[in-house]
Image (cartoon, rainbow, N blue to C red):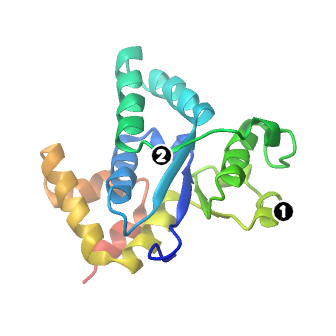
Amino acid sequence: MSTQTNPFIVILDTCVLAPMPICDTLLRLAEDPGFYMPRWSQDILEELQRTLRKMGYTEAQAGRRVASMNAAFEDALVTGYAALVSTMTNHPKDRHVLAAAVRCKAHAIVTDNMKHFPASSVAPYDIEVLTSDEFLVHQFHLNRELLEEKLHRQAAARGVSYAGILQRLAKCAPKLVELLRTD
C-alpha cells in the first residue's frame, strides 16, 4: 500500500464514517499524504446524514459534519458513478459504494459491513474490502510512529488521554488497539 508513486485510494463506507472515534481516526490519518486518499460519494454522505440523525445528531450537526469532511478533503467526492450502479452484483443497498469505488479506481473499500461486498462482486475490479480494524492494522504496519502521533493528537483534541482514545477505539478496532498496547 505505498503512497509514494501511486496513492492508495480508499472509499470509506457510511458505517465507518458514522461512529465518531473511528471516523475521526480515519480522517486524521488521511490528512497526511503518507497514508491514503479518502473518497466518498454523495450517496454515502446522504446515508451518513440519515445515520447520524438516527444516532441522535440534529440535522444541523449532521450537516456540519458532512460539510466539514468535504471542506477538509476537497477531492474526496466521487461523481459520475450512477450509470455503474445497476451493473454491480453486490448487495443492492451498497451497490452505489462499489460503483463509486470502481469509478474512482479505488484500491480498497473500508467497511464494517463485509457481507454486502462478497469477493465474487469485487474481484473483477481488483478492489480489497477491509474492515476499519484491518485497514488501521495495515496503517500501523506501514508507519506505527505516525499513527501513534495522530492518535495522540486525537486524544488531545478530544480532551482525553491516549489510553482514553484507545478505549474508545477498542470497540471498532480491537486488533489495532491490541497492537498499540503491546510493545
- Most extreme residue toward the bottom is 183
According to the picture, the residue beneath numbered tag 1 turns out to be: 120
- Along the line of sight, the residue nearer the viewer: 139 or 39: 39
Determine whether 143 is above or below 174 in the image: below
Give the label on residue 75, or none.
2
What secondary structure is found at the residue carrying circle 2? Answer: loop
Residue found 35% across the figure and 33% down from its top: 68
Classed neighbour count for the residue bearing mark 1: other residues with Cα under 10 Å, few (<14), some (14–19), many (≥20): few
Rendering coords of residue 152 (x, y %): 18, 60
Residue found 21% across the figure and 66% down from its top: 149
Q: Nearer the viewer, mark 2 or mark 1?
A: 2
What secondary structure is found at the residue carrying circle 1? Answer: helix
- Residue kind at label 2, given as amino acid type: Asp
- Along the line of sight, the residue nearer the viewer: 49 or 73: 73
Indicate left or right for 137 with 97 as reference: left
Determine whether 93 is above or below 36 in the image: above
Specify the quadrant of the image occupied by residue 55. Answer: top left
- Most extreme residue toward the top is 59
Q: Earlier in the sequence, mark 2 or mark 1?
A: 2
- Residue kind at label 1, given as amino acid type: Ser
Residue found 25% across the figure and 76% down from its top: 145
Residue found 58% across the figure and 30% down from its top: 47
Image quadrant in which the C terminus is located = bottom left
Specify the quadrant of the image occupied by residue 106. Answer: bottom right
Q: CA distance from mark 2 to mark 1?
A: 29 Å
- Along the line of sight, the residue nearer the viewer: 10 or 57: 10
Classed neighbour count for the residue bearing mark 2: other residues with Cα under 10 Å, few (<14), some (14–19), many (≥20): few
Rendering coords of residue 169 (x, y %): 34, 55
- Along the line of sight, the residue nearer the viewer: 78 or 136: 78
Rendering coords of residue 99 (x, y %): 73, 46
Rendering coords of residue 172 (x, y %): 43, 54
